[in-house]
Amino acid sequence: MGESGDPAVALLDKALFEPYLEPSEQILWVGRPGGSKGSMRRVPEKSKKERRAEAAGYVILIVILIGAYGTEVGSKHHDWSWSRSFLAGAVTVGLMLVAMMALLFSMKLVLIAGRFALSPFHRQALNDSSYALTDLRAMALRRSQSGALRMSSYDSVNKPRAMLREDGSGNVIFGYKGGLFPRWGGRRTPNASCLVLENIDDAAAVYRLAQAALEERALLKAQLMDAAP
């Protein structure tokens, strides 16, 4: 079993989670939020080739939008000059993109302000939290609130995500996939409960452990389906 921090504390945390375990469920890791600070970067979920193809797709889409709008402008003003139509489309689509980015930036500022206002309560909750990773799910509980277990089952999660610092600490996120605000989780995966193992010192190792456990779980499910009559 892996652990984060003091071995004695790890044994206490393991004992906290044991009453919630299924008969054959095994704890792979236990830990608590650490004290690391600093900016985090999202671990890429796609290869460089996939990201380049995605970026090329966005560029092609923007060019198509510019051309389509420019054609519409040209038809309205009976001016089919390619350069003028394309310029009109480029300006319009550019302004739309700027407006969209400004809106998203404003929304992110609101989220940051809200997070800052709630940070004292959030720190208190983190200081009272313990985490566990098993071969079936990720779990978290508040030590002062017996029975307040939160979990995210591997059966409803496509893959974990991670936000890591250079020292390997950070967040491991279950039940969410990439979105506009990856620091806060992004878009929710259908039928999955979101759970963030937040600010753990060995997040990189836990992320790899979670990936391996999820892949093993998926392989086992596939084998059971193949064996079914």
Image: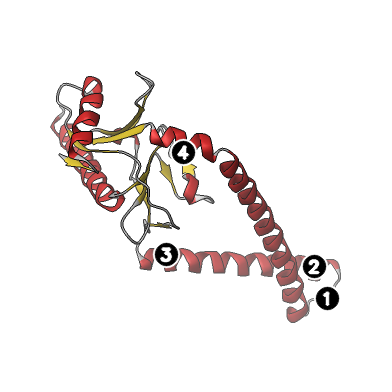
Q: Could you tell whether 173 is left or right of 99 in the image?
A: left
Q: Quadrant of residue 214?
A: top left
Which mark is first along the chain, 4 or 2? Answer: 2
Look at 18% across and 32% down and name the residue there: 11
The location of residue 181, given as percent across then percent down, is 52, 50
Q: Residues within 10 Å of mark 2 (few under 14, many from 20)?
A: some
Q: Is mark 1 in CB contact (under 8 Å) with mark 2?
A: yes
Residue at 25 percent across and 25 percent down: it is 16
Pointer 1 local density, CA inside 10 Å: few below 14, some 14–19, many at least 20: few
Q: Which residue is mark 2?
A: 73
Q: Amino acid at mark 1?
A: Asp
Question: Who comes first in sequence, dot 4 or dot 1?
Answer: 1
Residue beneath disc 3: 51
Instruction: Report, in whole angstroms, how far the alpha carbon at label 2 lies from the one at label 3.
Output: 33 Å
Q: Report the front residue among 13 and 103.
A: 13
Badge 1 is on which residue?
Answer: 79
The Cα atoms of the two marked residues, 3 and 1, are separated by 38 Å
Check the image and report above or below for 9 versus 84.
above
User: Which of label 2 and label 3 is nearer to you?
Assistant: 3
| Percent of width and height locating residue 126 | 41, 36
Of badges 2 and 4, nearer the viewer stands 4
Q: For mark 3, does the 10 Å Cα neighbourhood hold few (<14), some (14 to 19), or many (20 or more) residues? A: few
Instruction: Report the amino acid beneath label 4.
Output: Arg
